[in-house]
Amino acid sequence: MKKYNPFPILILLVVMIFSCKTREDVRQYAAIESYPNDTLLKSIENKKAMIVLAHDDDMCALAGTAALLNKNGWEIAVVSFTKTPERDAAQVKACKNILDKVMFVNLTQQQIRNDNEDQRKGYFAFAKDSFDIVFNKEIIEKEYEKIIKEFNPTIIFTLDNEMGGYGHPEHVLISQMVIDLSTQKRIAPQYIYQNVYTNHMENSIMERHSKRMKSWGFPGDEWQTAKKIYAVEGMPEPNVQIVITSQAQAKMDYLRSYNERERKTIGFFVPEFEEYTAQEYFTIFDREFFKIIKIN
C-alpha cells in the first residue's frame, strides 16, 4: 500500500495562509463610479502629447493612457524635475516602452524652493497665497516653458491644480503653472487632461494610507489637513474615463520598473500592485480618469 505523503498539502496550506496575510483585496479601492468614455483624443489630428509633472513617479495613475496613445501612433514626452542620476535613469527605464521622450528640468532644490531647512516637510500642504514666497516661480516657469514649447504638444497631461492628488504643493504648483502658461499663450496646447481619481477611489485609498501611516507612528492626517488648507473637498471630479485594460501588462511593467523606494511610494496610491498579475490588477483598476480643460 502506497504511503500517504501530507507534505505537498502542507506546503499548499502555508502558501495559502501567507497569501491571505500579504495580498489585500484591492477591489474596495477601485472606482464604483462611471463617466463617459473619452472620444476627444480620437479626433485630434496632431497626435503629440506631453505629460508635465513635478516628480517622475507622478504619472503612475495615467501610465495606461500613455501606453494606449503611444500604441495608437501618438508621440508622447514626459517632463519633471530632475532627481538623482540613479532615479532619473530609473524613470527613463520605466518609460521606455510607453512613450518616446523623457526630459528633465535641471534645477536644484535650492533653485526650486526657499524653505529647504526641513526637506522631510517638503510634501506638506501650505496656503497657496504663500506659493510666490516659497517657490521661485519665475525660474521654474522659464525652464518648463522652454521644454514644453520645444516639443509643442497638442495635449498636456498633468495632475490637478486644486489638490495636486494627495496635497503635495509641488503638484499643485506645476499643474497650475500649465494652466497659467496656456492661458497666457506662452505655450499652445488645445486641451489639458488633469489626471484625477474618482471620489470613491480618493477617499478609500487615502483613508487606507492614513491608517497605515498612523500604525507606523506618523500623524497620518496630511491629506485631511491639505483639504482644509486648500479649501477643497478633494480632487476635482473627472468628466471622462479611458479604459486601459489592453495596456495592463505595459502599465504593470512601467510600475515595476522603478527602484524599490519609488515602488513603495507608488504602492501608497496604487495599492498592492506588486501582489497581483497585470491582468488581475487592471481588470479591477480598468480605467483612468481625467478632467478636461479646453484652452481658448
Image: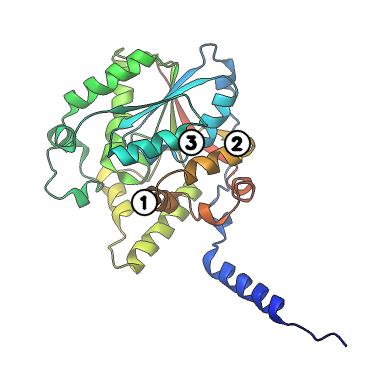
Q: Earlier in the sequence, mark 1 or mark 3?
A: 3
Question: Can the viewer see residue 34?
Answer: no
| Rendering coords of residue 14 (x, y %) | 61, 75
Q: Are marks 3 and 2 in contact (CB under 8 Å)?
A: no
Looking at the picture, does residue 42 appear above or below residue 97?
Answer: above
**Residue designated by label 2:** 247
Residue at (32%, 17%) from the top-left corner?
Answer: 183
Tell me the crowding category of disc 1: few under 14, some 14 to 19, or many 20 or more residues within 10 angstroms, Cα based.
few
The amino acid pointed to by label 3 is Leu
Q: Secondary structure at mark 3?
A: loop
Question: Can the viewer see residue 191?
Answer: yes
Q: Earlier in the sequence, mark 2 or mark 1?
A: 2
Tell me the crowding category of disc 3: few under 14, some 14 to 19, or many 20 or more residues within 10 angstroms, Cα based.
many
Q: Nearer the viewer, mark 3 or mark 2?
A: 2
Q: Which of 151/36 is in front?
A: 151
**Residue designated by label 3:** 62
The amino acid pointed to by label 2 is Gln
Residue at (53%, 42%) from the top-left corner?
Answer: 253
Q: Nearer the viewer, mark 1 or mark 3?
A: 1
Q: Secondary structure at mark 2?
A: helix
**Residue designated by label 1:** 261
Q: Based on the displayed image, in which of its 4 quarters is residue 103 positioned?
A: top left
Looking at the picture, does residue 66 appear above or below residue 268?
Answer: above
| Rendering coords of residue 13 (x, y %) | 65, 75
Which image quarter is the N terminus in? bottom right
Q: CA distance from mark 1 to mark 3?
A: 20 Å
| Rendering coords of residue 150 (x, y %) | 34, 13
Q: Secondary structure at mark 1?
A: helix
Residue at (28%, 17%) from the top-left corner?
Answer: 146
| Rendering coords of residue 274 (x, y %) | 52, 53
The amino acid pointed to by label 1 is Arg
